[in-house]
Image (spheres, rainbow, N blue to C red):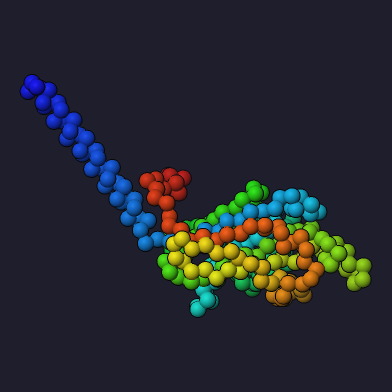
Amino acid sequence: MSFFRKKIVKNWIILFSGGLFIVIAIAGIVIVKTWGRTLIQVDIHQNKKLIHLSTFAEPPQFAIWLENPETKELKTVFVTHRVAIGDWEGKANVPVALPQWFKQFKGNGKPVKKSGSLKGSDMVITGATPKDDFFSIRIEVEPGSEWICWIEMNLAGDYNDAFPEFDRKAYKEDEFSNGQPALLFKAEVKALEGLKFTPVISAQSIWEDGVARVEPLSNGITTAKDVFDKIQISVIRPKPKLIDKNKIQNI
């Protein structure tokens, strides 16, 4: 092999080795960024056929929040935009939609905080009412930490015999078209990667005469129990990312 050919081969080897080193270094940095981090992911499937049978055929209002069982610290993971800002066509607030979330986070004029993160990120907690079948959201927590995950849901216009649009016996109209009351789902979560949890309906929440209360599920609840026909909570590690989409959007 000639001197020039040897030099060319040598240069290619140097370039290849340098490029490989850069790729390995970048991969290492990405892996390190996700090491020791834990996310709680909530996946919900909405029963669109049942939703379309309600009077308004609109997706339900709902909120997801975490409660620290020891300190009682509360953090909203997600709440539908209409509930969060009080967008009710002329009505400032309709606490009857999600009474327990309203009591915990907006009672006595509390402002809705934009950040719902528990560690390191500026997560916007409000969002348009999801219209797709599936809804998914994540929040970062300390690995090994324990939480109670609450999900409160109400489908407007979901009337039945027990919760009619107009109660002829009491001669009373459902002023806010609430239908069946909001339901509270609950799951006790430990943030260990790989664990999965299934929230169950624990109670119903009522707003009456300016007071929110939580009470056992009544026999009159029917279709409301199936609006969310699947809910799963998973504990995962963040996926490695070379590019932060949030930073790109802010440029």
**Residue at 17 percent of width and 35 percent of height:** 14
The foreground one among 229 and 239 is 229
Snapshot quadrant of residue 218 = bottom right
Relative image position of residue 141 (x, y in whole percent): 45, 65
Instruction: Identify the image quadrant of the N terminus.
Output: top left
**Residue at 64 percent of width and 48 percent of height:** 132
Apparent side of residue 100 relative to residue 243 in the rendered image (left or right): right
Q: In the picture shown, does residue 2 fall above or below 65? A: above
Relative image position of residue 25 (x, y in whole percent): 26, 47
**Residue at 13 percent of width and 30 percent of height:** 10
Relative image position of residue 237 (x, y in whole percent): 43, 57
**Residue at 69 percent of width and 66 percent of height:** 183
Q: In the picture shown, does residue 209 fall above or below 249? A: below
Instruction: Identify the image quadrant of the C terminus.
Output: top left
Relative image position of residue 223 (x, y in whole percent): 76, 60
Snapshot quadrant of residue 203 = bottom right
Residue projecting furthest to the bottom: 70
Q: Using the rendered image of the protein, determine whether residue 28 is visible from the camera's viewpoint.
A: yes
Q: In the picture shown, does residue 163 fall above or below 50? A: below
Image label count: 0
Q: Using the rendered image of the protein, determine whether residue 91 is visible from the camera's viewpoint.
A: no
Snapshot quadrant of residue 211 = bottom right
Apparent side of residue 125 relative to residue 141 in the rendered image (left or right): right
